[in-house]
Image (cartoon, helix red, strand yellow):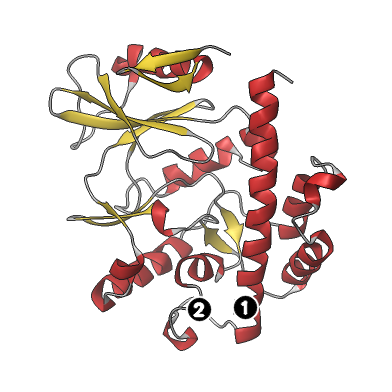
Amino acid sequence: MSLVIFNGEVFINERVNNILQLTLYRWRSWNRTNRCHLDFRPIVQCKLSEGLTNHSFLVAAADQQAVVRVNCAHASLLGIDRSREIDILTLLADSKLVPKVLFINDDVMVSEYINGAKLTKVMLENPPLRLQIKKNLKEISSFLSSHERRFSYLIHCERYVKQLMREQLQLVDVSHLFSLAEYLDSQDWTPSLCHHDLVRENVLVSDDGVHFLDWEYAAMGHPAYDWVSLFGNEFPLDEMDCGPVSLEMWQLLGNFQRELDKLWRILNIKLIENFESGR
């Protein structure tokens, strides 16, 4: 597959470049917001930090900036549901919790560029900021998506495993992962809107507040899932305001997330290799 040269560096494949250029060509169809209202076609300023699946670019026309995210070609095989992502972003559109979407389809999403800093461990140790993030997580959990079916963690894991060969699964204790997922699904908990990939890199802190990025895996999941992802065991459990959750469940969610992350990384590598080889 041919590669595209940008500022002297090889950095994206032909598919990504074609989608990127077509999206820029169609800039007149983008929504206009207070942060971004273009008067002419934008150009690529730079490629943003490398994601593990998608490619994101900062684009600009004069002083107007936006982010173009070109989605990976194998999203559905990773359990990503683009229609669900659109539904959830629409649900959150009037809040300041997410960047406003300017354009979106199955291949690409264009959103406002927010000038801020990615959350770090040191920043999270700041009590006022941590309190604000907890308030934001409570607000997110209050939204009810039209995709109200409770997310099944076991089915999600099974779909991953079915795509892998036995030798590819040697780094994951699949039986343990399935046991954790089955127990999680069997418990009595009320689902709430979950990001499901709430690592610090997906939290942006700006002068306007806290913003949450990359909602590809969001669904109606366990109410403590995002809290465990973001806070882990670094803060007292009684400081968490995610509803009643036992120490046992908190630890189980942490163990499950670590094992699922291993499985996800193995599958993602396989899918990227398959795509690049044309299989």
- Amino acid type at image mark 2: Asn
Question: 97 left or right of 107?
Answer: left
Q: Position of residue 57 (x, y in %)?
A: 35, 30
Q: Which residue is mark 2?
A: 233
Q: Position of residue 190 (x, y in %)?
A: 62, 70
| Residue that protrudes farthest toward the right in the picture | 166
The amino acid type, in three-letter code, at marker 1 is Gln
With 267 as the anchor, is 163 left or right in this view? right
Q: Nearer the viewer, residue 221 or 17?
A: 17
Q: Residue at x 24, y 14 (%)?
A: 41
- Residue at screen point 52% across, 25% down: 107
Lower sequence index among marks 1 and 2: 2
Give above or below for 163 relative to 95.
above
Residue located 70% across and 75% down the image: 188
Question: Is there CB contact under 8 Å for labels 1 and 2?
Answer: yes
Compared to residue 108, the image places residue 225 above or below, namely below
Any part of residue 29 in sight: yes
Crowding around mark 1 (Cα neighbors within 10 Å: few <14, some 14 to 19, many 20+) is some
Q: Quadrant of the C terminus?
A: top right
Q: Secondary structure at mark 2?
A: loop
Distance, label 1 to label 2, CA atoms, is: 8 Å
On screen, residue 241 above or below 204: below
State the residue at coordinates (32%, 23%). Answer: 30
Q: Which residue is mark 1?
A: 251
Quadrant hosting residue 112: top left
Quarter location, residue 25? top left
- Quarter of the picture holding the N terminus: top right
